[in-house]
């Protein structure tokens, strides 16, 4: 297994997205420590279940998925006849239900830098993934439409509409104080594109500040950058699949539509009519 994992890292990892490569490398390190001395044919579902039981629920699912990818590669190489890891059921993962209210987001933005305010402004209009926003180039904006390159094999999309020009101009404005020019809409002072880790550090610092500054007696709840993507979908469910560039409408409804329903109770008059009473 150790040799198989190393060969997988050399041949298959380079073809994955940078963020996925980092996640896979971390998982492969853990998997190698446990399964490294075993022969691929000796890895049975019972061993994988035992491994999964010792890991956190979500992390265990991700690591088993990586192990399954390695074993699929083993089938291609002829090391095993079939991938038995596929038979291992995943831990149930309840869908996240956090919906960010408008007032929460507006208060959070008062704790943010101009960069983060501009970023969130564009995120609220498009709902696209963090990686897609950070990868936008100046050439993707033609003063009317914003081109968002596709991910995961989809098609590129052009976004247009009310407020988009102002949002992009706000993003461009924060670049004026930068000494170096950059091809990216969101660029560091050195002209480089923000990395996922770098952006998450910025977000966490501002979120910690937002939580720490809560008035006495008020409890604030943490939310993630990804929760804003869900907010965009929840606030306009009819157009959510197209706006989020998601292949599955069912997945959008299940994972991203989180806004609580508003239900009006029956009035006293309606209740009396239901049971045959007379209204006053």
Image: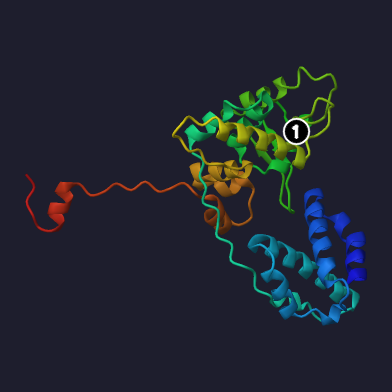
- The crowd level at tag 1 (other Cα within 10 Å; few <14, some 14-19, many 20+) is some
Q: Is residue 26 above or below residue 180?
A: below
What is the quadrant of the N terminus in the image? Answer: bottom right
Give the camera-side residue of 210 and 112: 210
Residue 210 in the image: state x and y as whole percent: 57, 32
Q: Quadrant of residue 52?
A: bottom right
Residue 223 in the image: state x and y as whole percent: 57, 42
Give the camera-side residue of 15 and 200: 200
Residue under the image location 20 percent in, 46 percent down: 267
Give the camera-side residue of 71 and 91: 91
Residue 226 seen by the camera: yes
- Drawn side of residue 260 relative to residue 141, left or right: left
- Drawn side of residue 210 relative to residue 83, left or right: left
What is the quadrant of the C terminus in the image? Answer: top left
Instruction: Count every numbered label the image shows and give the total.
Output: 1
Residue 160 seen by the camera: no
Residue under the image location 17 percent in, 50 percent down: 270
Residue under the image location 71 percent in, 40 percent down: 200
- Drawn side of residue 3 relative to residue 65, left or right: right
Residue 97 in the image: state x and y as whole percent: 51, 51
Residue 279 in the image: state x and y as whole percent: 8, 47
Q: Is residue 223 above or below residue 188?
A: below
Classify mark 1: helix, strand or loop: helix
Q: Is residue 84 above or below residue 53?
A: below
Q: Quadrant of residue 208?
A: top right
Give the camera-side residue of 6 and 146: 6
Residue under label 1: 140
Residue under the image location 84 percent in, 81 percent down: 41
């Amino acid at each position: 297994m150790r040799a198989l994992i190393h060969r997988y890292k050399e041949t298959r990892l380079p073809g994955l997205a940078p963020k996925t490569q980092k996640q896979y490398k971390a998982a492969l390190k853990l998997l190698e420590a446990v399964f490294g001395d075993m022969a691929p044919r000796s890895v049975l579902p019972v061993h994988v279940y035992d491994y999964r039981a010792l890991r956190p629920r979500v992390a265990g699912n991700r690591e088993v998925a990586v192990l399954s990818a390695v074993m699929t590669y083993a089938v291609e190489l002829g090391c095993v006849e079939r991938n038995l890891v596929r038979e291992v059921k995943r831990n149930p993962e309840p869908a996240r239900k956090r919906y960010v209210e408008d007032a929460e987001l507006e208060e959070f933005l008062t704790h943010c830098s101009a960069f983060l305010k501009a970023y969130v402004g564009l995120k609220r209009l498009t709902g696209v993934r963090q990686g897609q926003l950070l990868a936008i180039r100046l050439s993707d904006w033609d003063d009317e439409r914003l081109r968002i390159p596709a991910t995961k094999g989809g098609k590129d999309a052009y976004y247009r509409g009310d407020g988009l020009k102002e949002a992009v101009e706000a993003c461009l404005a924060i670049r004026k104080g930068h000494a170096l020019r950059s091809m990216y809409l969101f660029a560091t002072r050195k002209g480089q594109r923000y990395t996922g880790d770098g952006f998450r550090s910025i977000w966490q610092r501002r979120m910690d500040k937002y939580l720490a500054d809560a008035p006495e007696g008020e409890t604030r709840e943490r939310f993630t950058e990804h929760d804003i993507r869900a907010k965009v979908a929840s606030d306009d469910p009819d157009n959510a699949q197209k706006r989020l560039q998601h292949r599955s409408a069912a997945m959008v409804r299940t994972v991203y539509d989180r806004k609580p329903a508003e239900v009006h109770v029956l009035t006293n008059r309606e209740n009396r009519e239901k049971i045959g009473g007379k209204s006053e």
